[in-house]
Image (tube, rainbow, N blue to C red):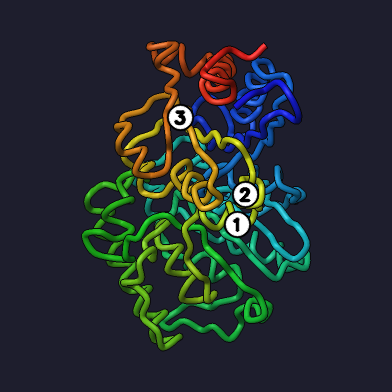
Amino acid sequence: MSAGAGPGPRVVVAPDKFKGSLSAGAAAGALARGLRRAVPGVRVVEHPIADGGEGTVEMALAHGFRPVSCEVTGPLGRPVTAHYAVRDDTAVVEMAAAAGLGLLPDGPDDDTARSATTYGVGELLRDALDRGAHRLVLAIGGSATTDGGRGMAEALGARIGERLDLSGLDPRLAESSVVVACDVDNPLIGPWGAAAVYGPQKGAGPATVALLDRALGHWADLVAAATGRDLRELPGAGAAGGLGFGAAALLGAELRSGIDLLLELSGFAQAAAGADLVVVGEGSLDAQSLRGKGPVGVAAVAARAGTPVVAVAGRCTVSAEQLHAHGIDAVYPLTDLEPDPARSMSRAAELLETTAGRIAADRLTDRGEKAP
């Protein structure tokens, strides 16, 4: 493809965050700078992405949403200032803004694993309803909690004692749609449930894991008695310490793939249509990436638009054949330029700019000739 005559090639840069180094927006900016330096006529569309975890609100803000702040109850009961995004009647909320691991002042331990609450998540949703939102998109990555959404339900008006009383649940929820960005398929309880699989990451020792699992089972019993539906085995019910269960069972939420939902929300398919190239990326392109997260989800949408895809990554631990099978034509690891991981992370923006020049030489000029 020549960069000489006529309008220059159009490239969509759609990286996820490079964890510990750059936000998705900063990574997109670095790639765009490198492409523009290599091919002055190139038309770059910066489309930073997220898959339902950290960075979801930032992604929404990059695509026409406006920021909203409010004070809510943090995971340990102390007030925190949380931010979410609103556009028209849609609100994008990160549960981690109210109940995330990053809000634990001294990090997770056995005590926080037992006590952390999703009450502030319910307050965030209530605030969005107060501002006129009728479509609530809840991203549930990064939680510090394993309460099954019990705290969220209380904040939204449920009363919990020997039985669960839903008569006070905010009536606006019945007139709203709730969609949960969820990329795990764990059930609520048992050996693959919220406590057993994710509790240790939140500081829970073996005794606390067992306690939390029993508590989630009792909570599921209360919810089933109150609603007439038992969703403890629903794939994704165990996400975010059982918040997936609480949202589905009590708010009627639909659980959807985070990357698919957010690409739809941000209009990525329209951006990719007719582009000459899509550049995806994240800090570590690995086996977990191949399960439909970040770059692979983007590549699937780009493939439907007939647009070729290449990836950049801090490091890559999957084969070229595996990437080809998921629609990624080539990968450019930053370790090719800087093998030392610490230096690579500290120089990530610079290395991404340089890598963008390599991509331009390989993909945007005839026979790999360097652009003027």
Q: Amino acid at mark 1?
A: Glu
Alpha carbon separation for disc pair 1 and 2 = 6 Å
Q: Secondary structure at mark 3?
A: strand
Q: Is residue 14 visible?
A: yes
Q: Secondary structure at mark 1?
A: helix
Quarter containing the C terminus: top right
Q: Nearer the viewer, mark 1 or mark 3?
A: 1
154 is higher (above) or lower (below) than 98: below
Q: Earlier in the sequence, mark 1 or mark 3?
A: 1
Q: Quadrant of residue 237?
A: bottom left
In the figure, is residue 275 to the left or right of 180?
right
Q: Amino acid at mark 2?
A: Phe
Q: Amino acid at mark 3?
A: Gly
Q: Residue at x 71, y 31 (%)?
A: 43
* Residue 293 disc label: none
Q: How many marks?
A: 3
Q: Secondary structure at mark 2?
A: helix
The answer to whether the residues at label 1 and label 2 have Cβ atoms under 8 Å apart is: yes
Residue designated by label 1: 264
Q: Nearer the viewer, residue 31 or 75?
A: 31
* Residue 283 disc label: 3
Residue designated by label 2: 268
